[in-house]
Amino acid sequence: MQPSISFQPLLEVDLTAGTVGPLVLSDEVRRAWVGGTGLGLYLLSQELRPGMKATDPDCPIYIFCGPLTGSDVLSSSDCALTTLNPDIEHHVCSAHAHGFFGSRLRQTGWDGIIIRGRSEQPVYLWIEDGRGELRPAVDMWGADTFETPQRLRELAQSDGSDMSTACIGPAGENLVWGSSVRVDDFSGWNTGGPGVVWGAKNFKAIAIRGTGTVPIHDPQRLAGLIEQMALEMAESEAVTPPWPFGRRFLAGQPARVESYGGGASGLTAIPMVGELALMNGKNFSDTEIGVRFGRRLGKDLRKWKVESAGGWNCEIACHHRTTCTTGPMAGATFTGFGGEAMEELGPNLGIEDPAIALLLSGVVDGYGLKAASAPRIIAMLMEAFENDEISLEQTGGLDLSWGNYQSVLALLDLTVRREGLGALIAQGFKTTAVTLGIEHRAMHMKWNGFQDYDQRAAPLFLFQSQVVSGADLSSAIDAELAFGVAIKPESGVDEVLDPEDLSYIPDVAFKSARWTMWENSAGMCHFLVRHLHEVTHVEAVSAATGHEYTYAEALRTGERLLVLQRQIQMYLGFTPDEDLVIAERLVEKIPDGPAKGLGITAEELRDARDRYYAIVGFSTVTGAPSQESLEWLGLDKVTVGRP
Ligand code: SF4
């Protein structure tokens, strides 16, 4: 075996002791668990103790790059955060951020950061070319996620061109359910509630300054593979099929994947999403408002000043910096991804003016909240208010009629301050719904605000979110496959999926999840990987690390991670019935509109779950992986958690 030269140390932070130092893991561990999500899940499995909660001081946070992060490989920006999930019981947080944070981290000599303990006073971690230290953040506590990076840049006397940041806002500081960590102004670890875990540790931010190159085992071989990737990407665009929904409902107007690419693509995809009836409207009760919202946004986008923003080595640049020129927000500039956030903060709240949705998405980002957290709860409250199920007295006098964005702003502010009705919202979806007796209005998966889009129109996506992910409803998902913007012969999908045929779901969900778990460990952004042949991706990881992974080994590694994730869930107390806890309306067929009749019923969901369990080797009685599966994957030698 060739000696590996590509592994760098990890930066280990003890907030209780106030120490920062290097940690070197064996090459054997690094190769077996690759990096990113893989290494995070493995180390989490070793560190769990009975009764550990996400907000406990000893709950570890793993921020890991993959072996490709920060390299010359296209879109090699991925950086994974793994910890316990404070939003969903018995689950892990497995979030991914892009931007420049991960690449800069590796370029300063570190492959990842491990954070444990709890600081007495708020602190941030400063990293500069091979060194790390904890610094006071008392003065920054309370600052939002736009002001905090600015303050960090001022302290470092940097114009930002050589710096990356990650930080929480007031939501994370106040342990508000659904809090995120904002990264590099445009990106973030949004899913799984990591902002709460940071807030519980009095940990405000990370700032990285430095330049350098990441070690690559075989640069010449990797350069050849990068050329190959460029070719595959070009060919992929040439053969990308139209969306099945486009084919079904918009005959003659196929929506193509290029709609995602180029400037501000996260925003420009939204009109298409609306047209295809995939957008949430009025807490999923209105299938028409999303269509109107999308058309209006399409017109506004031609007037607004929209600049695309990307991550390390990324030409797709799906994030945006937008100056609004219409409506009451004219003149204001907002940054972000803009896709799902616009949907959640526009039509799902009954708001039809895209400029207002853009404003609200900026507010939510600034607080450090996931778009599908408090806003999804507010949509539930609005629907209950409109149906006289909650009173003005219960809302604290706020008129929660559809579209009342001033009430939304007031309620978001109350939420991050944990005051009035906001104090209830801050405790989460289930607590709010049960306390007010409006559970039937909660549009949740496992009482979590799931990834936007009306997933009933793409039953594979819904199944992946609800059952397969097992982490935070966004990992182990191949949305493009589910929505039909990609085909994946390697996953057994060589033609566009038919959303009315549910028979393929368990098998395709397993195969795509197995691949996605591998991909989530390697360091490239999924938006690029989806265009590549999987074998090329595996070869790139081999060239980078010096360990010759075979394609079969990559798939086995991905499957091992799926099963290890389930073992962690079992240790935390998971039962298989939790995979069926979902809003009733989500397991009804769509009643009207262009996607009428699509969806998966509760019986079909249970049947698909049972068939998926049979494929991956999980018991439908206990949820646990079979001994045969553990042995085949080598997990019989891995002890999960302390006794
Ligand atoms: S495609 Fe988007 S998410 Fe991916 S690296 Fe580029 S800008 Fe970031």
Image (tube, rainbow, N blue to C red):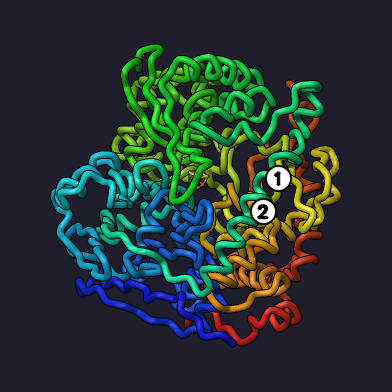
Do the residues bearing badges 1 and 2 touch, measured as CB atoms within 8 Å? yes
What kind of residue is marked 2? Leu
Q: Nearer the viewer, residue 576 or 274?
A: 274
* Secondary element type, mark 2: loop
Residue 64 seen by the camera: yes
* Secondary element type, mark 1: helix
Indicate which disc residue 187 carries: none
Residue 130, by quadrant, is bottom left
What kind of residue is marked 1? Ser
Q: Residues within 10 Å of mark 1 (few under 14, many from 20)?
A: some
Residue 480, by quadrant, is top right
* Image quadrant where one finds the N terminus: bottom right
Pointer 1 residue: 236
Label 1 – label 2 distance at C-alpha: 7 Å
Q: Measured from the top left, where is residue 308 in percent x and y?
A: 45, 34
376 to 183, vertically: above or below: above
* Total numbered labels: 2
Q: Residues within 10 Å of mark 2 (few under 14, many from 20)?
A: many
Q: Nearer the viewer, residue 285 or 473?
A: 473
Q: Residue at x 83, y 51 (%)?
A: 504
Q: Measured from the top left, where is residue 14 in percent x and y?
A: 27, 72
Residue 402 seen by the camera: no
Q: Nearer the viewer, residue 133 or 581?
A: 133
Indicate which disc residue 532 carries: 2
50 to 150, vertically: above or below: below
Q: Measured from the top left, where is residue 510 in percent x and y?
A: 73, 60
Q: Measured from the top left, where is residue 607 in percent x and y?
A: 81, 53
Residue 161 located left or right of residue 303? left
